[in-house]
Image (cartoon, rainbow, N blue to C red):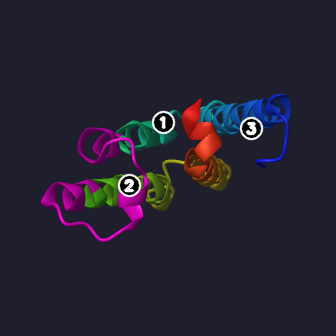
Amino acid sequence: MADLPGYVTACLHSGGLALLAILVSAGIVLQILACALYDNWWPMLTVIMYVLLPMPLMFFVGSGTSSFFSESESSWEDVTKFLTGFSATGSIAIPIILKHADVIGWGALIMELSSLSIFVLAILCFMQMSKESEYSAL
């Protein structure tokens, strides 16, 4: 993208940010619909895990996402990876446990898991956008 004019590059980055906003909004809408359509607000327990998921990364690793995929030398980075994995597993396990206990129905479970997959897709898109040098300079 080095040979593109600056206004085209800025437009592409704005489109990427718009895509992230649409993905996060769609995930939130699915999360709320999973509760509202079935008149059961127990699936909102997964919001706790969605809030806890980025916290270890923000507090211990810093802004770089490259250390999340590399071998760590610090015990704090290992703790961060463990807590992030725990939160991600909880995000999947809570709706499945609620379905197993017959607290929620199949529709709510499918909406919860699709909401999680949309959030994961948004995180992966954000990480890809963060790797681009032009985007980091903005």
In space, the residues marked 3 and 1 are separated at their CA atoms by: 24 Å
Residue drawn at x 59%, y 46% as measured from the top left: 133
Residue drawn at x 38%, y 41% as measured from the top left: 63
* Of marks 3 and 2, the one in the foreground: 3
Label 3 secondary element: helix
Label 2 secondary element: helix
Is the C terminus in the top left, top right, bottom left or bottom right quadrant? top right
In space, the residues marked 3 and 2 are separated at their CA atoms by: 26 Å
Compare marks 2 and 1 and give the one earlier in the sequence.
Answer: 1
Q: Quadrant of residue 39?
A: top right
Find the residue positioned furthest to the left: 75
Q: Quadrant of residue 8?
A: top right
Residue drawn at x 62%, y 38% as measured from the top left: 135
Q: Amino acid at mark 1?
A: Met
Q: Which residues are magenta?
A: 55-80
Q: Which mark is residue 90?
A: 2
* Of marks 2 and 1, the one in the foreground: 2
Compare marks 3 and 1 and give the one earlier in the sequence.
Answer: 3
Please rate how many residues cluster around mark 3, counting C-alpha atoms within 10 Å: few if below 14, some from 14 to 19, many from 20.
some
Residue 78 magenta: yes
Magenta stretch: helix, strand or loop mostly: helix
Q: Which mark is residue 44?
A: 1
Estimate the x, y position of residue 126 in percent, counting from the top left: 59, 45
Q: Which mark is residue 19?
A: 3
Q: Is residue 135 left or right of residue 89?
A: right
Q: Amino acid at mark 3?
A: Leu
Residue drawn at x 40%, y 48% as measured from the top left: 64
In space, the residues marked 2 and 1 are separated at their CA atoms by: 13 Å
Q: Amino acid at mark 2?
A: Gly
